[in-house]
């Protein structure tokens, strides 16, 4: 039994399948990541909602059902399902970053079932188009200015990773990117991405605040 919920205004939708009521979709091992991604793209294309710019990185995670919950699995052979994340392409040679860098705004959990109605166990589609014909020039903070905001706490922690409160944190990489939100916005905002040890990731807006008249 599968449930589809859709916002007819925004086009945002979600799919969920009740594995507690029917476990048959996990009777067969899930496909490899490349096949699962192709199946999800095919489903989106058939529905007429596969955008042209959803050609960025594709990531995957192996999952298994344990005590009624989905948990991580170490390998395909140990998994019941596979999660596929379809990220947006880069713009101006800058990567597109979502609110959770490990989760795309368009993702699905795919089974190995040959029944198409049982292949998408969970799916989330929070896609909003970018008008590449519209652009503007804006003042960008320097990396030093962005780091000062980071140390002052004016930062969005996208993923704390394995870090714990009180742990010392070393930033290993800083780079520019575009923020790809899961809600509709007027423009694609540039950000500074700060990456540290143990999967830590944080964002600082790259546009200078005085650009907004603050």
Image (cartoon, rainbow, N blue to C red):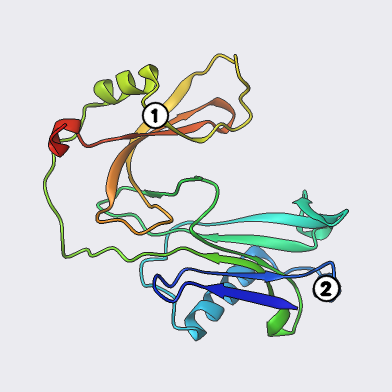
Name the residue at 80% across, 63% down: 80
In front here: 103 or 76?
103
Residue under pointer 1 = 155
Counting residues from the start of the chain, the first of labels 2 and 1 encountered is 2
Residue 134 sits above or below residue 13 on the image: above
- The image shows residue 153 at horizontal and vertical percentages of 40, 21
Q: Residues within 10 Å of mark 1 (few under 14, many from 20)?
A: some
Which element is circle 2 on? Answer: loop
Where is residue 4? Give x, y as percent.
Answer: 61, 76
In this rendering, which labeled residue sits more in front, label 2 or label 1?
Answer: 1
Q: How many marks?
A: 2
On screen, 23 above or below 126? below
Question: In the depicted view, which residue is nearer to us: 93 or 46?
Answer: 46
Residue position marked by numbered label 2 in the rendering = 28
Please state, as top left, top right, bottom left or bottom right, where the C terminus lies in the image: top left
Residue at point 36% right, 25% down?
Answer: 154
Question: Percent position (x, y) of residue 37?
Answer: 58, 69
* Screen quadrant of the N terminus: bottom right
Q: Is residue 212 above or below residue 126?
A: above
Q: Gap between marks 2 and 1, in whole Å?
A: 44 Å
Question: Residue at horizontal 80%, vertical 58%?
Answer: 79
Q: Locate residue 39 relative to residue 7 in the image: left or right.
A: right
Q: Quadrant of residue 133?
A: bottom left
Q: Position of residue 212 (x, y in %)?
A: 16, 38
């Amino acid at each position: 039994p599968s449930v589809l919920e859709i916002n007819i205004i925004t086009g945002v939708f979600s799919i969920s399948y009740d594995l507690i009521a029917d476990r048959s979709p996990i009777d067969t091992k899930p496909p490899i990541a490349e096949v699962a991604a192709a199946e999800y793209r095919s489903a989106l294309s058939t529905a007429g909602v596969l955008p042209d710019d959803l050609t960025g990185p594709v990531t995957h995670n192996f999952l298994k059902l344990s005590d009624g919950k989905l948990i991580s699995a170490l390998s395909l052979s140990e998994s019941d399902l596979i999660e596929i994340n379809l990220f947006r392409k880069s713009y101006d040679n800058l990567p597109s970053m979502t609110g959770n860098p490990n989760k795309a705004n368009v993702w699905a959990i795919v089974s190995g079932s040959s029944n198409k109605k049982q292949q998408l166990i969970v799916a989330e589609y929070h896609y909003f188009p970018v008008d590449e014909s519209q652009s503007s020039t804006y003042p960008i903070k320097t990396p030093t200015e962005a780091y000062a905001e980071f140390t002052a706490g004016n930062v969005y922690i996208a993923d704390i990773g394995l870090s714990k409160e009180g742990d010392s944190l070393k930033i290993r990489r800083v780079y520019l990117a575009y923020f790809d939100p899961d809600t509709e916005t007027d423009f694609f905002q540039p950000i500074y991405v700060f990456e540290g040890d143990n999967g830590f990731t944080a964002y600082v807006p790259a546009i200078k605040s005085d650009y907004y008249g603050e």
